[in-house]
Image: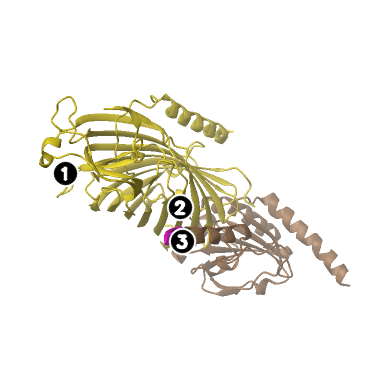
Chain colours: A brown, B yellow
């Protein structure tokens, strides 16, 4: 057996090992439903630092997006509507922009009249933290900071947001009763 | 509905093209052919879960350049008599055309399968039978032309995205070439029907393995993207005792998004191919210095069947490949053009060494990519 054949067989074994288990990763992994969302700190468009933990007690829709991403901008009006409707009822949208400059994002936000907080993930760190490698991704986080839903692709509608929030709100009293 | 119709139409159209060409024509003895190789991002990447990426591309590769210090005289691989005859052909030109249907499907977001189905068309011209006295020609050889076409070896590749982030991607792949291409094609040669040489067959006649790695990085997100790729292909020895040499391909380049519908690509490609090997006896064509034996039958140098490197196979090739991609969905807003792009590359040789064989000239690749979300990604 030549050295090259040995190399090929080695590659085959390595590939077969990696493929079925999906365990070897230099990137981060998608958080599973029920797990605690990892905290982060990012600057918003005004330069003010915001963290995920400061919204503890609220339902958070963490949305990863970019201006060039059509499905992202398509679902944003639904997010804005839900935010307008539910911001006083313990709901917040955190729109995390990926790898774009502030000027471009500020223009976009102004043009479409979005009022929810927009955080700038310049170095892709928070996206990696949440296993995001395609846009858009939306993560619903409950009042206790646990991931409740992870949605890939541009699938968010106003109805979907309302339903998810309602489901999370319904879970909270049950959990509280169980703790008592 | 439109997507399904398009898919059906696409497959039917491709099938029509496949089957409308004439069948394999009588062919003379034959010689090598090479193909152009470029990095097409949508082919190397792992499709997201549930996404089917269809690439259909055409590849035109001429091999007809005599490099300095070469004369195009190469050996013949006589499969029926299990012999390698040195200096038996004088090459004129080979045109290789390949129509490939490449399907990429994301099983998970990080693991994908690729199936590439090639349809090959080879046209070749050379002088055969150098040194032999055919119809009293004095050993100058006989001009032969042939062409052949059909399905080549299908490639099945498993890919895994090692580094799934928004700005980077590292994809490893391990694939198998299935010997689906015809490798028993007979010729209507100068001494009656004989088995065509392995390098001119549509398939290699034996399984092959390929390992690959592909890397991309967004230097300026959604504006300037760098990529690199490397692959290694090994083919096992076929039933005729012929083994194609190992192949190493490397690519390095960048994509520049100028406007959303136009992406410019520049890449450098390097290929190293090891000599083919043949298990057979060794002869050589008669030359005028052989006196009365010229012109005449080939002279046996070694009657033992043993493994021999085939001279004039193997090559080193370095090329510059500019190209562009038109994102039709960005330019024309219709359901048909959504998630669709067309691309064109021209591969220009910078440095090449083909071990005395004809060298590969400027090659072209053009194709179309369409993506279909066949399953919900969540």
Left or right, residue B367 beside residue A133? left
Residue matched to label 1: B71
Q: Position of residue B248 (x, y in %)?
A: 37, 55
Q: Quadrant of the N terminus of chain B?
A: top right
Callout 1: residue from which chain?
B
Q: Nearer the viewer, residue B179 or B214?
A: B179
The answer to whether the residues at label 2 and label 3 have Cβ atoms under 8 Å apart is: no
Q: Secondary structure at mark 2?
A: strand
Q: B246 and B22: which one is in front?
A: B246
Name the side, left or right, on which B144 lies relative to B168.
left
Q: Does the magenta portion include A2? A: yes
**Mark 3 lies on residue:** A7
Q: Mark 2 near mark 1, Cβ–Cβ under 8 Å?
A: no
Report the residue at 37% width, 54% height from top: B249
Viewer-side residue, A142 vs B255: B255
| Residue B210 marker | 2
| Circle 2 or circle 3, nearest the eye | 3
Magenta residues, start to end: A1-6
Relative to B284, is B250 above or below? below
Residue A33 can be seen in this image: yes
- Percent position of residue B294, x then y: 14, 36
Q: Secondary structure at mark 1?
A: loop
Q: In the structure shown, which secondary structural element does the residue marked by tag 3 occupy? A: helix
Q: x%, y% of residue B11?
A: 50, 32
Answer whether labels 1 and 3 touch (C-beta < 8 Å): no
Q: Chain of mark 2?
A: B
User: Majority secondary structure of the magenta segment?
Assistant: helix
* CA distance separating discs 2 and 1: 33 Å
Q: Is residue B253 visible?
A: no
């Amino acid at each position: 057996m030549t050295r090259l054949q040995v190399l090929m067989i080695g590659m085959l074994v390595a590939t077969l090992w990696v493929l079925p288990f999906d365990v070897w990763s230099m990137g981060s992994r998608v958080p599973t439903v029920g797990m605690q969302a990892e905290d982060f700190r990012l600057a918003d468009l005004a330069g003010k630092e915001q963290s995920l933990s400061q919204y503890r007690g609220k339902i958070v829709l963490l949305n990863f997006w970019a201006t060039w991403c059509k499905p992202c901008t398509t679902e944003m009006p639904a997010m804005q509507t839900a935010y307008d409707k539910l911001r006083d009822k313990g709901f917040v949208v955190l729109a995390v922009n990926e790898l774009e400059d502030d000027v471009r994002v500020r223009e976009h936000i102004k043009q479409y009249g979005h009022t929810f907080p927009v955080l700038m993930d310049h170095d892709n760190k928070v996206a990696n933290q949440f296993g995001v490698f395609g846009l858009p991704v939306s993560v619903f986080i409950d009042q206790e900071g646990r991931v409740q839903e992870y949605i890939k692709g541009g699938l968010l509608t106003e109805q979907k947001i309302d339903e998810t929030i309602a489901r999370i709100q319904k879970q909270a009293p049950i959990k509280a009763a169980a703790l008592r | 509905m439109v997507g399904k119709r398009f898919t059906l139409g696409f497959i039917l159209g491709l099938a029509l093209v496949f089957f409308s060409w004439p069948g394999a024509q009588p062919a003379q003895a034959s010689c090598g052919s090479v193909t152009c190789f470029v990095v097409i991002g949508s082919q190397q990447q792992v499709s997201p879960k549930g996404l089917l990426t269809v690439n259909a591309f055409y590849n035109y590769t001429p091999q007809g350049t005599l490099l300095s210090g070469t004369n195009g005289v190469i050996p013949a691989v006589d499969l029926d008599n299990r012999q390698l005859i040195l200096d038996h052909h004088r090459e004129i030109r080979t045109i290789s055309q390949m129509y490939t249907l490449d399907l990429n499907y994301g099983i998970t977001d990080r693991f994908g399968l690729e199936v590439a189905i090639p349809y090959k068309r080879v046209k070749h011209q050379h002088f055969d039978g150098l040194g032999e006295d055919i119809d009293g020609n004095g050993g100058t050889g006989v001009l032969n032309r042939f062409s052949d076409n059909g399905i080549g070896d299908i490639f099945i590749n498993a890919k895994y995205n090692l580094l799934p982030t928004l700005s980077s991607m590292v994809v490893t792949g391990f694939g198998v070439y299935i010997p689906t291409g015809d490798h028993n094609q007979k010729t209507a040669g100068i001494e009656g029907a004989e088995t065509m040489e392995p390098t001119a067959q549509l398939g290699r006649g034996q399984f092959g393995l390929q390992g690959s790695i592909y890397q991309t990085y967004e230097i300026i997100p959604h504006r300037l993207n760098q990529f690199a790729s490397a692959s290694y292909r090994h083919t096992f020895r076929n039933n005729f005792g012929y083994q194609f040499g190992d192949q190493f391909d490397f690519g390095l380049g960048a994509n520049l998004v100028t406007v959303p519908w136009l992406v410019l690509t520049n890449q450098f490609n390097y290929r190293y191919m090891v000599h083919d090997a043949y298990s057979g006896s060794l002869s050589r064509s008669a030359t005028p210095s052989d006196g009365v034996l010229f012109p005449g039958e080939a002279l046996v140098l070694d009657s033992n069947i043993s493994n021999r490197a085939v001279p004039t196979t193997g090559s080193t090739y370095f090329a510059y490949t500019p190209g562009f991609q038109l994102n039709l969905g960005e330019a024309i807003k219709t359901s048909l053009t959504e998630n669709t792009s067309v691309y064109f590359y021209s591969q220009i040789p910078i440095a090449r060494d083909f071990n005395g064989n004809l060298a590969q000239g400027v090659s072209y690749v053009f194709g179309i990519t369409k993506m279909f979300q066949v399953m919900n990604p969540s």
